[in-house]
Amino acid sequence: MASAKEKIYRPTDKEPFMNERQRDYFRKKLLAWREDILKEAKETLQHLQDENQNHPDLADRASSETDRAIELRARDRQRKLIAKIDSALQRLDDGTYGYCEETGEPISLRRLEARPIATLSVEAQERHERRERIYRDD
């Protein structure tokens, strides 16, 4: 257990960007997030199996089917999120993690803290969303 004097490490702009300590920090953060998602998915699967009983009441059955559809959609989102986490871990291995895919510039540490799977800087993400809105409105 860390003593009260030992501060929990947080990446800062005062150190070299994506140095070994920062990469290790984000790797641990991504792996912990991935583990949480897998644990949650396992619980969801168990819940679906427990719920997989016949409901004599039509309303109960309909409610159960609705719950099942919601949980399956959530699992699909979780599966996509795990793929993004795996992709981020791969970028950590190949040295491209933390850099914007569009500009090659560093993504801010604040953005990576909030969204460790980010592949675009805030500015590039905003441009991307503006383009999406323009095409969506057509």
Image (cartoon, rainbow, N blue to C red):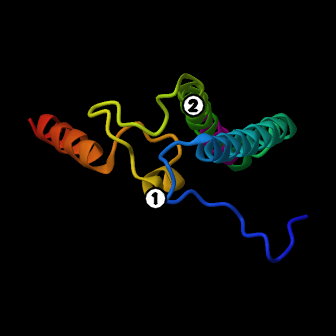
Residue 118 placement, left or right of 102: right
Confirm whether the magenta stretch covers residue 67.
yes
Which segment did they paint magenta?
A: 63-72
Q: Main secondary structure of the magenta part?
A: helix
| Quadrant housing residue 48 | top right
State the quadrant of the N terminus.
Answer: bottom right
Residue 108 placement, left or right of 138: right
Q: Which residue is mark 2?
A: 92
In the rendered image, residue 100, in percent from the top left (x then y), is placed at 35, 36
Q: Can residue 55 be spotted in the picture?
A: no
In the rendered image, residue 45, in percent from the top left (x then y), is placed at 79, 35
Q: Which mark is residue 52?
A: none
Q: Amino acid at mark 2?
A: Leu
State the quadrant of the C terminus.
Answer: top left
Number of other residues with Cα within 10 Å of mark 1, as a class: few under 14, some 14 to 19, many 20 or more: few
Q: Residue at x 55, y 26 (%)?
A: 87
Q: Amino acid at mark 1?
A: Asp
Disc 2 on helix, strand or loop? helix
Residue 99 placement, left or right of 33: left
Q: Residue at x 73, y 45 (%)?
A: 32
In the rendered image, residue 27, in percent from the top left (x then y), is placed at 66, 39
Front in this rendered view, residue 81 or 60: 81
Extreme residue toward the bottom, this view:
4
Q: Which residue is mark 1?
A: 13
Number of other residues with Cα within 10 Å of mark 2, as a class: few under 14, some 14 to 19, many 20 or more: some
| Quadrant housing residue 20 | top right
Q: Residue at x 17, y 44 (%)?
A: 130
